[in-house]
Image (cartoon, grey):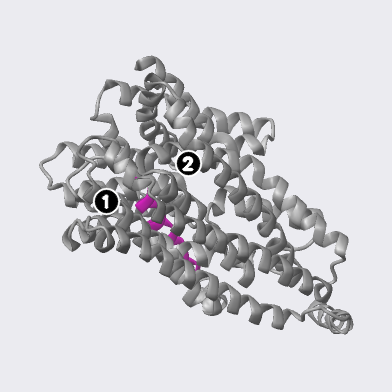
Amino acid sequence: MSEKTEAVQMENVTSNSGSLSISKFHAKSHFWGRLTLWSVIILTLTLPMYLSFGLGHHPGWNVILTGFVAYAAIVAVVWVVEPISYYPVLGVSGTYLAFLNGNIGNMVLPSAAVAQEVIGAQPGTEKGEVTATLAITGAAIVNTTILVFVVLGGSVLLTVLPDNVLVAFDYVLPAIYGGVIAQFAIQKPSWGVAGIVIGLAVNLGPIPQAFETFLCVFGTIAACLMLDKMNKDKKEVA
Amino acid sequence: MSEVMELANSGMLWAIASVIVGIVFFQAFKFMSLASKASGSVGMTKKDVRAAVRTGAISSIGPSFAIVIIAISLISLIGNPVALIRIGIIGSAPIETVGATLGAQAAGSELGTDSFTKQAFTAAVWVMCLGGMGWLIFTALFTKSLGKIQKKASSTPKRMSLFKVVSTGAMIGAFGYLGTSQMIVGLGASAVLLVSAVSMPIIMAIAKKYNMSWMKEWSLGLVVLIGLILGYFLG
């Protein structure tokens, strides 16, 4: 019923000059979204190709494959899970924007959600999608501008900073990992413990380095599936 | 190490980074114009359009600074243009650090050390770029059919919940491995890891209690700052 009224409203307003119907908006979003994404895909391949074959620093396909397989073991599930889980909030146009810009959980989604509340648009509706798209474009422009300024100035900062400050940057990795692990562990304590125990076992055990990440990731997945099942069984008994 | 940074900041890399950033800006302005033109057909006024863009812009300032604090740490490891590309397009600083670490390790090297040669840098760039392309390719190919996939996935809630366990487990496993590999580096790194692990939930709890969502956005940036300060005194 509400969909019908929306459709009627849509027809009334599309007669305005210079406006797009939502289906034309989607068609144009697909065209420009795909064009921009494929351009960036080609450019991101150009970068390592240039280093490998333009300058001759090729480390060998074996090395690249070993690193990529280890990395893919971590992120490959996310390539598929993220676009699917965020689609109802982002819609067609928002998806193209969000996955080019990244920082979806910490920037894109909050921006879109606040804007939808300001406008009074429901997520998942056409109005919600247009609102989210507008908010994400605003966020993307601000974020990229700040990033460009910092990256341009950041190198100057690095040459100006004294050595003992630069040494402190060695502790960025443990800080990031400690914070992220704690964030997971506080939501799912038993899963966090499983990850740390398996991580320690893999790190200290006599395992070839190439297999360490793989083993730890899949060991933890298995442990989490088991813990999840145990948890559900307990609930069923209770 | 300095030779590698010279390569990492060379002209051609800056040129590629500039074009990529140009496309990111172009896409944002193109979609802003498209959505603005479509706004009338969903019952939005021009005032609504401006409010939506402004809200998005304001909301992104907090996260942007948090992102940028971590981005600076990435600059010291892989140089400015590559950091700009990796953070500017899909990817977050922690996960890109993972990609760079794994690429360097595959080349038998360690980020930020003398063993990080030009070949190791190239390997790290390959792994980061190939890894980041997964999202772009999936989105470019399957956004059209995502609506249908979403319907199917939610029609079987059991499969979806299992899938979520698998992906969360993969992330915990990855960070469990990387975190513990930092713990065996030395006492200083272990201390920073422990302090961050304690700080993060405290920051989150304070943000939740006083309803400060900006603090949630700043949480990882703050934790890194705490790590840097602690690291400075540890030397």
The magenta region covers B156-174
Q: Main secondary structure of the magenta part?
A: helix
| Point 76% across, 52% down: residue | B54
Q: Which residue is identified by label 2? A: B71
Residue type at mark 1 is Gly
Q: Chain of mark 2?
A: B
Placement of A91 over or under A166, stated as above or below? below
The spot of residue B235 in percent (x, y) is: 34, 17
The residue lying at 29 percent from left, 45 percent from top is B101
Q: Residues within 10 Å of mark 1 (few under 14, many from 20)?
A: many
Q: Which mark is residue B103?
A: 1
Pick whichever, A204 or A225, lies toward us.
A204
Lateral position of residue B58 relative to residue B127, left or right: right
Q: Is residue B208 left or right of residue B225?
A: right
Tell me which label, 1 or 2, sits earlier in the chain.
2
Q: Secondary structure at mark 2?
A: helix
Quarter placement of the N terminus of chain B: top left
